[in-house]
Image (cartoon, rainbow, N blue to C red):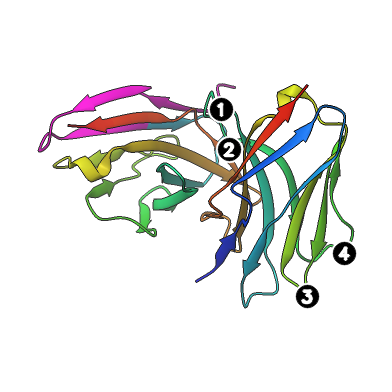
Amino acid sequence: NAGVTQTPKFQVLKTGQSMTLQCAQDMNHEYMSWYRQDPGMGLRLIHYSVGAGITDQGEVPNGYNVSRSTTEDFPLRLLSAAPSQTSVYFCASVRNNEQFFGPGTRLTVL
Amino acid sequence: AQTVTQSQPEMSVQEAETVTLSCTYDTSESDYYLFWYKQPPSRQMILVIRQEAYKQQNATENRFSVNFQKAAKSFSLKISDSQLGDAAMYFCAYTNSGYALNFGKGTSLLVTP
């Protein structure tokens, strides 16, 4: 099993550009989550999904969209990137209340 | 909302010694889960240990153990026989939903030879 995979590993955007961070898991987990990590802070929840077709907002959802068309995939979309979205993004899938994290994506918005 | 507080931004320990990292949390729930995650410079989030609130026995994983005090809402991590590879950021986290973890701000652990 590959576990949780994220692409890309690094990305640089200009303000106003859009992009999608990809996340996939092969463990057939129903729950998936997106977090962002800023310097000096722990991870904060952006959006989560409790199953295909079901998503909801977390603590810091503004500027991000998600969808969950399959159990495996949970992409995070930035519609119009802002410098405040410069961060490291982690995707996770959940089994038995334990989160399995992907390797993260470092995003810089200039 | 649940909050998780790690009051030690940085800690230092000598190799082979023991160190304890502190964590407190605030919740009105009775059923929940607590975790310690390790984040080395590679930035990968690695689960160190977990504790179910309904279990009175403190969790242990090899050199890592916790002191879970439910009434005091305290969840400290003890690392015994510290090794150079233990150097990392350590995050305490809480969940009662499964899909949403609340993290503390982390403790940076330095291990000196």
In percent of width and height, residue A49 lies at: 42, 51
Q: Is residue A8 visible?
A: no
Measured Cα–Cα span from mark 3 to mark 4: 11 Å
In percent of width and height, residue B22 lies at: 71, 55
Dot 1: what SS? loop
Reply yes or no: does residue A101 show up in magenta: no
Q: Which chain is mark 2 on?
A: A
Measured Cα–Cα span from mark 4 to mark 1: 31 Å
Dot 4 corresponds to which residue? B56
Report the side of A23 relative to A25 (left or right). left
Dot 1 corresponds to which residue? A3
Dot 2 corresponds to which residue? A100
The answer to whether marks 3 and 4 mark residues whose Cβ atoms lie closer than 8 Å is no
The kind of residue tagged 1 is: Gly
Foreground disc of the pair 3, 1: 3
Tell me which segment is drawn in magenta.
A1-22
Residue B92, which numbered label?
none
Dot 3 corresponds to which residue? B71
Q: In terms of image quadrants, where is residue B107?
A: top right
The answer to whether marks 1 and 2 mark residues whose Cβ atoms lie closer than 8 Å is yes
Measured Cα–Cα span from mark 2 to mark 4: 25 Å
Dot 2: what SS? strand
Q: Which chain is mark 4 on?
A: B
The kind of residue tagged 3 is: Ala
The kind of residue tagged 4 is: Gln
